[in-house]
Structure formats: C-alpha cells, structure tokens
Image (cartoon, coloured by chain):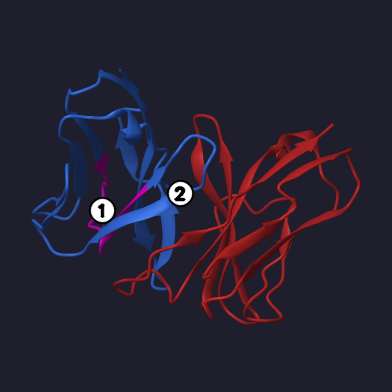
C-alpha cells in the first residue's frame, strides 16, 4: 500500500531533549516536506526537499533540522525542543515538485508533539 | 512568506445548506490545489486547477479558478455531515514549485 509513515504518532518530551520524528514514503517520490499545524495558523511549512541531498527552508525553519540521505526518508530533528514547538506535525511527499501537473501531496498521519 | 488568503476561517451550516470557501492571492497563481482534512485526520488531496477560468466538479463539490488566476473557490451543494472538516487551498510558490497552504476554512454541519 502506497503511504507516508510517520513515527511516533504522539510524543511528550521536556525542553532541551533532542528528538527525531521519522518520515518514510514507499512511492519513490522525489519531493518531501514537513509542516506544522497550529490552531488558527493552518499548515506552515518547516523544510522541504526536492530530491536526495537537496533540502531548503520553508516559512518556519527555526529550531528544526532535516536531512535527505535516502529518497524514501526525511527525518525532522529538534536539537533542543522548546514549548513553542508543541504542535501537530505532518510529513508529506509528492512525485515531483508541485509545479508539475498531477503531483498531489500525500500526507502522513501526523505526530502530535508536546514539549513541557 | 505570504500565504494565500482563505475566507472564511469558520463556517457553520445546517445540513442541506450550501457552503463556499474562497482563496485569494495578490499575485497570479500558476495553479492551485485543494485539500480536505477530516477532524483528527490528515489533509487529503481533492483537486488541482491549472487553467484560467477552469471549473471542475466532483459530485456535490464545484471548484473554480478565476479568470485572472488570482482566486479560487470551492462550493459544496447541499452539505452533509460527511462534509465536516477543514478545507485548504494551496499555491505553488517559486521556481521550484514549492506548495504553500492557506489557513483553511473549518466547516461544521449541524444535522
């Protein structure tokens, strides 16, 4: 089954404790992206990747890191989490960059992160 | 970065009433996509519009792209409780075609 898999689904952590949220897709998609969703703010892009070893900042990259060493994986790293990073996080992938027709985003099920 | 502006932010309707959400941009859009997120779920792709003045239908849903490609709308005829959720429009930004979302319209339907 074609899917984007995020882990974990829920995570409660403390300020400053490094964490990684994993994201994997099995569709051989070139494009991957991370979003955070907060009430009233919609989906805001954190980082995206056009292909292996190609990553770029989105609108809210501060406090986050990513890597794209393999096509299928795009982990999100919080080196020193803070309470303002408490949010619902979504990973998404697409066959190609969004300027191409028929490249919809496929989303993972989300990771709800709480930083205390 | 500036998002596309989406209105209204919330909409409460009685089952059977129509619903419309609008997406507006100050710049010309190359294309626009629409997504639906059910409560507790993740966004799911509905449709992509590319051509000026394009109109597409999916059962009770009608999607339009403005003639100037600066706005788009999603209209639901005779809403049902299964239509509950948040509807997002998303624009392609930049030469790399990165996808940026509006803030969404949250629809609630009273049976």
- Of the chain colours in the picture, the one used for chain B is blue
Sooner in the amino-acid sequence: mark 1 or mark 2: 1
Q: Which residue is mark 2?
A: B43
Instruction: Tell me if residue A61 is in the magenta stretch.
Output: no
Please, is residue A112 above or below residue B66 in the view? above
Q: A41 or A110, which is in the foreground? A: A110
Provide the letter of the chain coloured red: A
The local crowd at label 2, few if under 14, some if 14 to 19, many if 20 or more residues have their Cα within 10 Å, is: many
Q: Nearer the viewer, residue A110 or A17?
A: A110
Q: Which mark is residue B27?
A: 1
- Closer mark to the observer between disc 1 and disc 2: 2
Secondary element under disc 2, as helix, strand or loop, is loop
B28 displayed left or right of B102? left
User: In this rendering, would B20 be left or right of B12?
Assistant: left
Range drawn in magenta: B23-35
Q: Is residue B26 magenta?
A: yes
């Amino acid at each position: 089954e074609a899917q984007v898999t995020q882990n974990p689904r829920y995570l409660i952590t403390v300020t400053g404790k490094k964490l990684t949220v994993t994201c994997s897709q099995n569709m051989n998609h070139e494009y991957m992206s991370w979003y955070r969703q907060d009430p009233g703010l919609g989906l805001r892009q954190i980082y995206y990747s056009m292909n292996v070893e190609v990553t770029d900042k989105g609108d809210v990259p501060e406090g986050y890191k990513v890597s794209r060493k393999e096509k299928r994986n795009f982990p999100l790293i919080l080196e020193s989490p803070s309470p303002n990073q408490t949010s619902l996080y979504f990973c998404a992938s697409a066959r190609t960059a969004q300027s191409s027709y028929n490249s919809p985003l496929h989303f993972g099920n989300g990771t709800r992160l709480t930083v205390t | 970065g500036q998002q596309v502006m989406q209105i209204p932010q919330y909409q409460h309707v009685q089952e059977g009433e129509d619903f419309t959400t609008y997406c507006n941009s100050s710049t010309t859009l190359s294309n626009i996509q629409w997504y639906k997120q059910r409560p507790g779920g993740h966004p799911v792709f509905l449709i992509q519009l590319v051509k000026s003045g394009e109109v597409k239908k999916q059962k009770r849903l009608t999607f339009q792209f403005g003639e100037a490609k600066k706005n788009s709308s999603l209209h639901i005829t005779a809403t049902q409780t299964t239509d509950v959720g948040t509807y997002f429009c998303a624009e392609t930004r930049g030469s790399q075609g990165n996808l940026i979302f509006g803030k969404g319209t949250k629809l609630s339907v009273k049976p």
